[in-house]
Amino acid sequence: MPDKTAMVKCLVWDLDNTLWQGTLLEDDEVRLPESVRELIRVLDSRGVLQSVASKNDHDHAWAKLEELGIAEYFVLPHISWSPKSGSIRRIAEELNFAHGAVAFVDDQAAERAEVAFHLPDVRCYSADQVAELAGLPEFSPETVTEDARRRREMYQAGFRRQAAKSGFTGPDEKFIRSLDLVMRIEHATVEHLARVEELTLRTSQMNATGVHYSQETLVRLLDDPRHHVLVTSLSDRFGPHGAVGVILLELGTEVWHLKLLATSCRVVSFGAGAVILRWLVDQAARAGAHLVADFRRTDRNRMMEIAYRFSGFGGETCPCLERLPVSDVGGLERLHLVPTPQDPPATMDLIAPDLGSSPEIRFSDVLSPSPVA
Ligand SMILES: [Zn+2]
């Protein structure tokens, strides 16, 4: 039985007498009700993806969706004469969604039964229910993040990027350079926090501490002048990747304390973690402060440790470490670095604030590290 409480991440539409009124191959004209056009727009703005499973002539039906001005809202449309359960199965596979996150709406009871039989976790709705879908809890996420609003755009960019990668012959680095990547690092706002919290929870491989920061904690830190909560987003010539990283940093005059760095697993191949660390090292070098990063080994975050070590963080002792408050998180290590100015990244453009220009930062050269005995 479908799980009634899980959120729907993709709604798959039948076309004839469901999305539009009329049968494309029989009637002269089909009609798109304004209420359906509005529903499509509303679900899209909530981050619910939409697709099509319709038994129709593909080119004819797609041309009609374009003519109605709604084709852009649908990802991975399956318009063919094959069974709809197969179409929906492939849509779920290509989106990497569980069947329980997929919904299907069709006016034909036989089509819904065929889908329900082969894909029992997919939630099926009749065309009579279209008017009420937007009000159902499974279509009403509690918070809609900036990334959710752009989810369809991000998926469409992802499909184009993937197609370009498949057709690309040559080393990975050359492909990455061909993307024209732009990384933006900016101070988080309250609107970012849902996504920031999500990143701290979901990015197990590239999370330096595995410590969960709740939205309430993060809101308090936004107002603390010593703390910087920074959010990193990536885009390229295919479109946005969305928010892909979070940095929690406490600035002191002599030491900058990197309490958390987490980046999305989706962008590991672009070296996003290393680019962020390099920028931080450069910023700290300009401010004349040492850098200390909290690190807690988990069974998943070895890649993050490598990124820190590769950026020069080590286990040496230094007087600055004593100035940091003792942490109550068990198993926490403090990795230390005396920063030096860094070159800008070679693989992407970086747009980032100048943290060192904050008035509370002053140059200091009183501290010097001593290597581990
Ligand atoms: Zn130090």
Image (cartoon, rainbow, N blue to C red):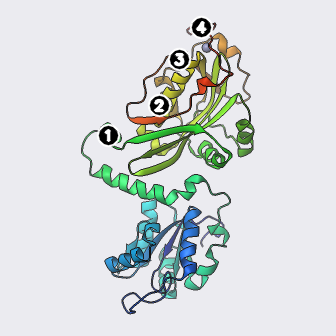
Residue identifier under label 3: 339
Look at the image and tell me in which quarter the C terminus lies.
top right
Q: Is residue 212 above or below residue 288?
A: below
Q: Earlier in the sequence, mark 1 or mark 2?
A: 1
Residue identifier under label 2: 274
In the rendered structure, find residue 368 and report the number of the disc placed on it: 4
Q: Earlier in the sequence, mark 2 or mark 3?
A: 2
Determine if the C-beta at disc 4 is less than 8 A from ligand 1.
yes
Circle 2: element type: helix
- Give the Cα distance between marks 2 and 4: 25 Å
Bin the neighbour count of mark 2 within 10 Å (Cα to Cα): few under 14, some 14-19, many 20 and up. some
Amino acid type shown at disc 2: Ala
- Give the Cα distance between marks 4 and 1: 40 Å
Q: Earlier in the sequence, mark 4 or mark 1?
A: 1
Image location of residue 272, percent across then percent down: 47, 36
Image location of residue 191, percent across then percent down: 65, 49
Bin the neighbour count of mark 1 within 10 Å (Cα to Cα): few under 14, some 14-19, many 20 and up. few
Asked if the residue at tag 3 contacts the one at tag 1, i.e. Cβ–Cβ closer than 8 Å, the answer is no
Residue identifier under label 1: 172
Asked if the residue at tag 2 contacts the one at tag 1, i.e. Cβ–Cβ closer than 8 Å, the answer is no
